[in-house]
Image (cartoon, rainbow, N blue to C red):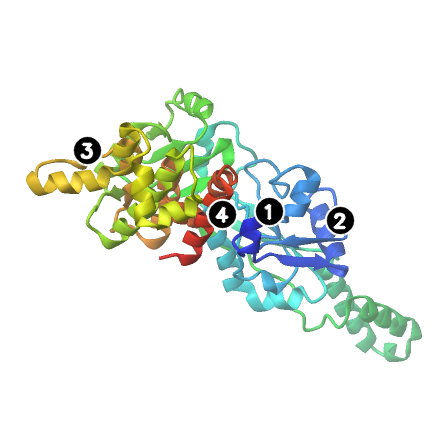
Amino acid sequence: MDKLKQANLYRNELILVNGKLVERYNRCLQKLGFTPTELSSFFIDGMGWSPEIAEEKQEQFYLNNGEANTHAIIITPKQKGIALYNPFHSFDKELMKAVFKTHAEKIKNITRDSALCLDFDQKIDAFYEPLDILKYKEITVKFHLINDLKKAKQKQLALIKEFKKDQNFIDEKIHQKLLDSAKKYGDLRTRTLDLDAVLFKTESFYTKAFGGIYLLRDLAMPILVFEDLAIYKEAITNTTYDVLMYHISHKELLDKLKSYNVIELDLNEPITKKRHQRIQQFMLAEYITENTHPIKDVLKDNILFKSYLNKIDVTARKKVMGLSIFLEKQKLSKNIKPEEVLHTEMLNALYKPHSSLRANEQDLIWSLLVNIAPKDVLFLYWYHKERFYKLFKKQSESTKEWIIETIKAGF
């Protein structure tokens, strides 16, 4: 991953936590029921998740109390708007946006000398079976402060009230209590420490619970897509809910998504043509087993591309050049269909979210599509980073360089 780090493509928005912030972070961990970290410094993302602490605890989701109960930690207003590097749900980014949109000034005020523990309450104490995720509808974000600042404020206000009563302004004991409170907590009289709960309604989403599940709502019939085959087999035995279920490898899934106008195929669209070029190049790189030229040069140079294309077997060649072959045949016969010429590998990689979908819905469908066919390295990086990192690690050094150049070039 060093190449990605050097290119600022790997966890480049993390915030350093050290000094007093470590103590506040640990108090949040303890308040949420977790053990504190022994690290003296670490980095966090927008939800307060730290890759170093995850490694220390050997638990990627150490901020979860089971799959049904997720949490976040805010110790600095700098967390507003930065990336989330290990979200448990696809809506976590929007959830944190809603939190900061509602309470940005209060968060800025509170984190001067305290920290916030966030509890995402969806009225589910624990998951018992895969279809429990259908209960995810409305999430209530609740806020909890460390240091018991709310109680300290109440005591401070009570002391002030007592100080003003009768002749108490000359009582040295009350003076001392007020001074002790001020030294420990500061002047809390005008501090706003109450944060109203934030309500967030879920729509279609992806969750990492049960090995990874996509829930597509607002269709003629809801669709669940499972990444884990064993979990899928368990889920289909449940007849309680009226819902369609597929494993992510099922060919029928894309057919159903097409029939529901969730995805579409437009081979003449400029964006599709750009994506096709990247997909074609990456597929050729996968088939090259022996090379005397750096892979990135082979993929970028037209002459070398043709040379190596003709060195792979004809079946692989047809897969790589499927779209070009189809477009040539289409000139002769308008009735020819893409699926009659393009190999499934290429065909699946060229689908896109239907243009009628809203932006957040398109993002979710992109995540699903690049997960089904991880051939477009740019979109895979944008929409499914975990899958991208796994794929990246397996590539040759030269292919890694091409991938980095491709991502940095973007569109």
Residue 322 visible, this angle:
yes
Residue carrying label 1: 71
Q: Check contact, mark 4 vs mark 2: CB within 8 A.
A: no
Whole-Å distance between the Cαs marked 4 and 2?
A: 32 Å
Which mark's residue is nearer the viewer, 1 or 2?
A: 2
Secondary structure at badge 2 equals loop
Residue type at mark 3?
Val
Q: Nearer the viewer, residue 48 or 56?
A: 56
Q: Nearer the viewer, residue 397 or 74?
A: 397
Give neighbour class at mark 4: few <14, some 14-19, many 20+ (Cα, 10 Å).
Answer: some
Whole-Å distance between the Cαs marked 4 and 1?
A: 12 Å
What residue occupies the far right of the structure in this picture?
172
Secondary structure at badge 3 equals helix
Which mark's residue is nearer the viewer, 3 or 1?
A: 3
Compared with 323, 183 (above or below) is: below
Residue type at mark 4?
Ile
| Marking on residue 341 | 3
Q: For the point 60% across and 56% down, which residue is it?
A: 14
| Marking on residue 17 | none
Give neighbour class at mark 1: few <14, some 14-19, many 20+ (Cα, 10 Å).
Answer: many
Q: For the point 22% across and 40% down, which residue is it?
A: 323
Which mark's residue is nearer the viewer, 4 or 3?
A: 3
Residue type at mark 1?
His
Q: Judge left or right: residue 8 versus residue 177.
A: left
Expressed as whole percent of the image width and height from the top left, the position of residue 181 reads: 82, 68
| Marking on residue 39 | 2
Secondary structure at badge 1 equals strand
Label located before the other in sequence (1 or 2): 2
Whole-Å distance between the Cαs marked 3 and 1?
A: 48 Å
Q: Judge left or right: residue 65 versus residue 245.
A: right
Residue 221 visible, this angle:
no
Residue carrying label 4: 139
